[in-house]
Amino acid sequence: MLNIPYLYYDNSYYGVVFKENPFLYITLGGDYTQMGSYNLAADNAAKRLNVKVEGTMSEKDAGGFIEQYNQIVSTFDPTEYEIVLDCTTLNVSTSDVLPMLEQCYILYKQSGFHKVVFTIAKNPVLKMQLGRVARSTKLENYEIIEL
């Protein structure tokens, strides 16, 4: 007998349930209906670029982020700044968006920020993903802080 899965949605979580065994299911993660959004603001007094990213980012969101990032970073010397990315409401990125995420990390590295800080809610999968991308892009001056 085939074990055919079907998709379900329950209280902001998507998952897969196997019809023949309703006790065997896989949760795919939190609220994938929420679109990605971001906000960037330079704090010149603290020498910090504050970045808030949330939801599920798409390639279009990532492209807009990179464009806005380049505009803001051109207004100060990033080697004198740290970048603090608030990722507390960010969902894990899908594989099609990972190349754009890698490009963002490369931008942080090339810009020369003296420190790159990611703050996340307790989410082992997101922490692992952010760390893996940092290592693959050779971003060495990063820190992931779980709140």
Image (cartoon, rainbow, N blue to C red):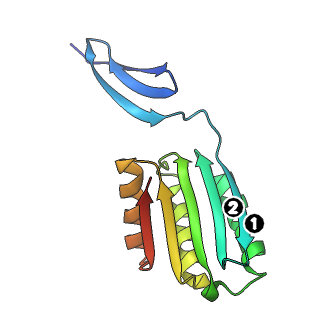
Q: Which residue is mark 2?
A: 65
- Kindly indicate whether the residue at mark 2 contacts the one at mark 1 (C-beta within 8 angstroms): yes
Q: Position of residue 73 (x, y in %)?
A: 72, 77
Q: Amino acid at mark 2?
A: Phe
Assign a secondary structure to mark 2.
Answer: helix
Mark number for residue 141?
none
Q: Which residue is mark 1?
A: 68
- Identify the residue at image location x=41%, y=78%: 138
Report the label total: 2
Query: Residue 143: image x %, image y %?
Result: 43, 70
Mark 1 to mark 2 CA distance (whole Å): 5 Å
Would residue 58 be found to the left or right of residue 70 on screen?
A: left
User: In this rendering, does residue 47 appear at all?
Assistant: yes
Name the kind of residue labelled 1 in the image.
Answer: Gln
Q: Nearer the viewer, residue 1 or 10?
A: 10
**Farthest residue toward the left?**
1
Q: Tag 1: Cα neighbours inside 10 Å, few (<14), some, or many (≥20)?
A: some
Location of residue 16 in the rendering, given as x and y in whole percent from the top left corner: 38, 25
Q: Residue at x 71, y 57 (%)?
A: 39
Q: Tell which of 98 and 50 is nearer to you.
A: 50
